[in-house]
Amino acid sequence: MQGKLELIIGNMFSGKSTELIRRINTTKSINKNILVINYSLDNRYSSQNEISTHDLQKMKCLKVSFIKDSFDLVNDYDSIFIDEGQFFPDLYDSVIMLVEKFNKHVIVSGLDGDSNRSVFGDMIRLIPMCDTVDKLRAYCNKCNDGTYGPFTKKISGSPSELLDIGGSDKYIPVCRKHFN
C-alpha cells in the first residue's frame, strides 16, 4: 500500500476536529486499524486521552508531545489521524516519514494560521506534500448573518502569546472586516 496524506485546515471553530472524527468513523466502518494522535497539552475540553470538538464530540486518542513518539506503534495501523497538527514541533518530518517510509494513510487537521493571521507551525509546509487539502471556514461571530469568518481573533489573554491553547473563552472566528 502506498502512503497518502490528507490535510484538513482552517481557523478555529471551522469544524476541523468534527471532520476528522467523521473520517475516523468512516475509516473504522471499513475495518481499518486506526491510530488517533493529539498534542499532549491540548486539555481544553477533556483531561483524558481524547480529542474533542467544541460541541464535545469525543474520540479516544494517544496524546504525545512529538509524533515520532508513536513510531514504534504505527506498524499495527493502516491509518494515522492527527488532530491539532500545528502544535507538534516535529509535524513536517514525522508526517513525511509516516507517509513515505511507513506507507501510512495520514490525515492531519490543524490551524492554517494564528490569531495574527501568520503561519502557525508546519501545517502550511505540508501542502505541497499532500494528496488532498480541505480548507474549512467558520461563520463570523460578529456579523451573525452567515458571513464566513475565516480568521481567528484573540479576545482574551496576551496578544503576543502564540501557544495559548483555548476555546471560545479566548478566540472567536471573524470576517476580514471584524478582524481589523
Image (tube, helix red, strand yellow):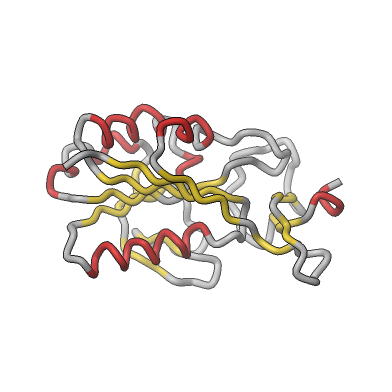
The correct choice, above or below, for 83 with respect to 144 in the image is above
Residue pushed farthest left? Answer: 76
Q: Where does residue 161 sit, x and y in percent of width and height?
A: 67, 38
Q: Residue at x 31, y 66 (%)?
A: 26
Left or right of 135 on screen, residue 142: right
Res 117 → quadrant: top right
- The number of numbered discs placed on residues in the rendered structure image is 0
The correct choice, above or below, for 50 with respect to 151 in the image is below
Q: Residue at x 25, y 41 (%)?
A: 70
Q: Does any portion of residue 109 appear in the rendered image? A: yes
Q: Residue at x 41, y 37 (%)?
A: 130
Q: Residue at x 80, y 71 (%)?
A: 145
Q: Does any portion of residue 40 appear in the rendered image? A: no
Left or right of 148 on screen, residue 124: left
State the residue in front, 36 or 176.
176
Q: Where does residue 104 sit, x and y in percent of width and height?
A: 23, 42
State the residue in front, 132 or 57.
132
Left or right of 13 on screen, residue 36: left
Quadrant location of the N terminus in the rendered image: top left
Q: Where does residue 142 sit, x and y in percent of width and height?
A: 82, 64
Left or right of 143 on screen, residue 92: left
Q: Where does residue 165 sit, x and y in percent of width and height?
A: 58, 49
